[in-house]
Amino acid sequence: MVSGTFVEVAAPARNREAGTAGTAPASRESGWSRIRRLAPPYLYLVPAVVLLVVWTYQPLAQTFVLSTYSWNLVPSTPMVDVGLGNYERLLGTPELGRAVWRTVVVILGMLPFTVVIPVAVALLTRRVRGRAQGVYRALVFAPMLVAPVAGAAVWQWLLDPSAGAVNRVLGTDVNWLNTASTAQWSIIVITGWHVVGFAVLVVTAGLAGINPDYAAAAQVDGASRSQVTRWVTLPLLSPTLAFLALMTVLLSAQWTFPLIDTLTQGGPVSSTTNLYYLLWEYGFRSHDAGLAAAAGVLFFLGFIVVAALLTRLAARLSHHDD
Amino acid sequence: MTTEVVGESSRARRLGGHVVLGLLSLVCVFPIYWLYATSLRAPQDVSSLSVLPWPLSTASYTEAFAKNDVLGMLVNTGVVAVFSALGQLLVALLAAYAFAAWRFPFQRLLYLMFVGTWLVPFQATMLPNYVLLSRLGLLETLAGVIVPTLCSALGVLLLREHLNSFPKELLDAARMDGRTSWSALWTVVVPTLRPALAALGILLAISAWNEYFWPAMVLQRSNAVVQLGLRSFMGTEGNDWGPLMATAGLACLPVFALYLVLQRHIVNAFVRSGLK
């Protein structure tokens, strides 16, 4: 991979060969200089790896351990070993199933904003270039930079039942955020507003990276414009789309968290309590560390399965451009 | 003749493109515009639907400053954003340098450790992290917000990519000069990498500025950063729209100011990190 490096890594192999060939021991370097020669990359990695272990991997392991105990997060109270009791309790609560379902709804509801609209917009606006394109880029990207809580504040104002602009323009008096049937969709739309411009730019960049020769060749062969889009452009774009889908699955619950925490607190009647918010409530409202840890473990395993499936799908789709 | 038809349809398509992008831009920008428009209306016009806020008034801002220590919150959030971004840059630069300039045993495994963090959702590690912070006495402190974020896997991956396309001859030349790898890092690599470092630093600082979950967990009893101050304002004075919009506007202002100056670079940094 790298040829001109500070340390020639071929050296240890040469040494070993020299050793087996039985050359004079005098030519072998001392242990100390060997360490000095091999140490630099590890030394440069120390801060990052220590931080990773301390703040990511060791806590992950602890979560697995914690999930078999009953504990209320107070250091002075003892932790009681309950085996798989937390998992039984977790899987026995009807809340979990509902929260999982709401998480799925959020993810499915987000896909139009992260995949469908961006692809449509990017395809329809390929001809817009130059300065105008720069201005549009700047405008559609702006919501991504709005702090989530500030976004929550302005949407609370826009959706206010009596004085809010949305109701007054529509002539309705819907309490969008405090009605069980509309709260979840309001959260999805607000989150969608935050990310849709970013997704458009990602798809546009993906389109720009496609070699135009493929489409030209298909057109020479008599393919219509929509056929080219369907059979040439979209397949070539599939790695970008897989990335956006993966991002949606992994991050949707995370994106909605600040909005749920500030706008609905999981309500009304739990209609916006997704898995992420449920975990937060177990841990920091009911102080049920074991249950929260068990839910965290299940969340992690679910992530791995979904990510593996999507990566495999992306790998299968991306062979087109070879 | 055929070229004419093609030209016409291409003009129509370009026009259609402008319509689509114009509508999307409007949808994206309107809430931001409304936020600042409301914050600049006089108190009696706050719920006016007129598009232009007129007459302009700074009464909402005066009230926001009087009700909350907005300035203190902005300074605290700035401290978090700057230290978090600088720390992440330094840690990521050292790690990316190791990956790009040497080949060593366990390199792949160590690299996968960084990639693997994508699969560890925050919620799977939050409780042990909370307990560790409380043991270290860092709960309710700004340091507690900064320290756990210092290793950015995204930063390592992006910088490694930049470093891999870095001309190796320059590193060789530095070695011929008898420089240590440490001095080569600061005299050869960093100056060449400055644009990439700046773009990444801005991306990291904006993310840290807007971060909500981690500060909400660490600072449960105070409102030291602007996101939390805004949340508590929403809770206690939820219907005082003018000052609330003013506070929200101030919470976004530093990022937007940066965006006005560095627009293209910020968009590219985000999209690049997305395409990774």
Image (cartoon, helix red, strand yellow):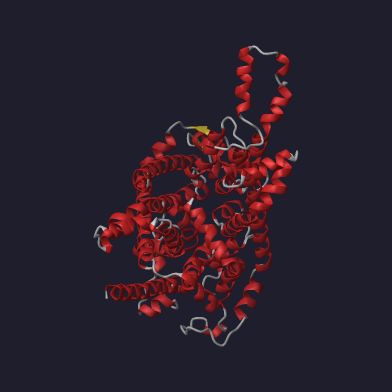
Query: Would you say A125 lies left or right of B44 here?
Result: left
Q: Which of B109 and A296 is in front in this view?
A: B109
Side of B150 relative to A181 (left or right):
right
Query: Residue furthest toward the bottom?
Result: B55
Is residue A75 shown to the viewer in this render? no
Is residue A6 placed above or below B253 in the rendered structure?
above
| Residue B218 x, y percent position in the rendering | 60, 51
Q: In this view, does A236 lie to the left or right of A195?
A: left
Q: Which residue lies furthest to the front in this view?
A: B1
Residue A111 location (% of width, % of height): 36, 57
- The quadrant in which residue A225 appears is bottom left
Dividing the picture into quadrants, the one containing residue A147 is: bottom right
From the image, which quarter does the N terminus of chain B lie in?
Answer: bottom left
Is residue B271 something one can see in this rendering? yes
Q: Looking at the picture, how far across and down is residue B22, in whole percent?
A: 42, 74
Residue B171 percent across, percent down from the top left: 67, 42
As drawn, A267 above or below B52:
above
Residue farthest toward the top in the current orientation of the protein = A22
Residue A112 vs residue B56, the one in the foreground: A112
Instruction: State the count of labels.
Output: 0
Q: Please tell me whether residue B41 is drawn above or below residue A71 in the rendered image.
A: below
Which sits in the foreground, A188 or A98? A188
